Amino acid sequence: MLRLLERRSIDYVPLAERHGKVWHLWPIWFSGDAHLATIAVGVLGIGLGGNLLWTSVAVITGCALGTFFMAFHSTQGPQLGLPQLIQSRPQFGYMGALLVWVVALVAYIGYNAFNEVLVAQTVRQLAAARHGIDAPVIIVFTLLAAAIAAVGYDWIHRTQRWIAYAMLAVLLLFSVAAAALLRLPARAWDLQDFRSIPFLVQFFAAAAYQLSWSIYVSDYSRYLPREVSVRESFWWTYLGAYVGGVWMMLLGTVAAALNPHAEVAAAVEQAADSVMPGLGRPLLVTALLGLVTISSLNFYGASLTLLSVADSLHPAPATTTKRLIGLALATAASIAIALLASADFVNRFGDLLAVLLYLFTPWTAINLIDFYVVRKGHYSIREIFNPRGMYGRWNWRGLLSYGVGFVVMIPFFASGLYKGVVARALGGADLAMLVGLPVSALLYWALCRDLDLERELRQVRIADAGLDPDVATNPAS
């Protein structure tokens, strides 16, 4: 059993242990989007009165924007051999990175609690049961997802590939049948029936949803050989996440257009059965399996984040046992939230998770501008784990840029908890991401203009000398 468990956690993956093929990034991120939660994102525009044509355009373009930034994070994995969030230390400092990690931890656990509630609702739909099955369904579903996360990186990749193949078959069958047989009202395709509020809400919801993967995307590319190019890792990630996201959201859009007053699971089942009787259940079951594996990714990320927090507070070697303890804590927390949450609490917690997405927007801008523009991928692996190292305990440049980026987004917020003045003026449209990304990135870049990067690069070479003793020439030098 122990041989099955991944040995690495937040520590560096040596070049001698790198393995896998870059095309494996396509199925892991296609499956990352091929599940019920993604379908639910695609119904927003229809629910606000948009038609099928313009809601579909919003989904396609919104996913294109959000996936663009997400896929650039994936390229960091082969270059650094580290999980995503531990890479925040050079931008925010050894202790400063705790800010992002705590937010990420709440998001991981919260999203999985939502997934568990969604699974229980879907199983009730499939079993035609009204009550009494939620608790056992939630527990079994969660333990299965946690088991995949416990085994670790390689088995997560394998299960995502299996789900991708199954989902591709079912989606192709539905899409071909729908294209040939579905008959929708003329208004659904009316080019003149453009409504700005439903369009903007759907556009930015799709973009933010895709961007939300950024906090752990390089966790699943960090074992790839360093020879994998930025172009290869970007495009395999982008195409997987984009195709999966657009396809599943459009499934939700079509289902909502056919059954605007039904719950998501019921609408999807009815839409599939309308084009091919009996297809609804296989489609829902396959989407449920996708929800299991994406929950395992969330649990895996939560365990790594807990280890990162523990390492900042009390530096010590990361072990498999510690990763499993972190996983157990995250699993217990998500089950408790799912079992204790009332319907109203779940709605309010969903509003909180929307705010957490705002908190990730300035982080992704700062992390990417630092990697691609400021330091150009040159980091010291050893100094990232040094409490008194070259990156400092608190990096004022990153923290200030983050704070300013978040504050300027506030007038553009549009969530159930708070609507900013600009969002209210636009009828509820959320443009926060469009503001936070450039402001955070440009401010951080300006504040880093006085960094002595040549001196820092010399420090990196000295600090990481012999990092990969089994490799004759260290590519990082």
Image: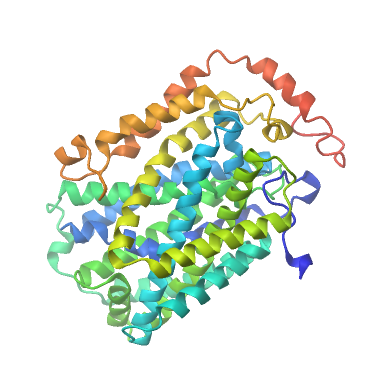
The answer to whether one can see residue 214 in this image is no
Q: Quadrant of residue 283?
A: bottom left
* Coloration mode: rainbow
In the picture provided, is 1 more to the left or to the right than 328?
right
Question: On the rendered structure, is 405 left or right of 429?
Answer: right
Indicate the position of residue 31 as horizontal and vertical percent values.
50, 63
Please tell me whether residue 274 is drawn above or below residue 419 in the rendered image: below
Res. 227 visible in picture: yes
Which residue is more in the foreground, 316 or 271?
316
Q: Tell me where residue 431 sits by quadrant.
A: top left
Q: Residue 160 location in percent, x, y?
A: 57, 65
Q: Nearer the viewer, residue 348 or 287?
A: 348
Closer to the camera, 171 or 260?
260
- From the top left corner, tell me how far across and down residue 469 is, in percent: 87, 39
Q: Residue at x 30, y 56 (%)?
A: 348
Q: Position of residue 388 (x, y in %)?
A: 69, 27
Among the 4 quarters of the image, the one containing residue 419: top left
Q: Does residue 413 appear left or right of residue 327 in this picture?
A: left
89 and 17: which is toward the camera? 89
Q: In which quadrant is the N terminus drawn? A: bottom right
Instruction: Name the residue: 53% across, 19% down.
Output: 448
Q: Residue at x 44, y 41 (%)?
A: 360
Q: Residue at x 74, y 50 (%)?
A: 18
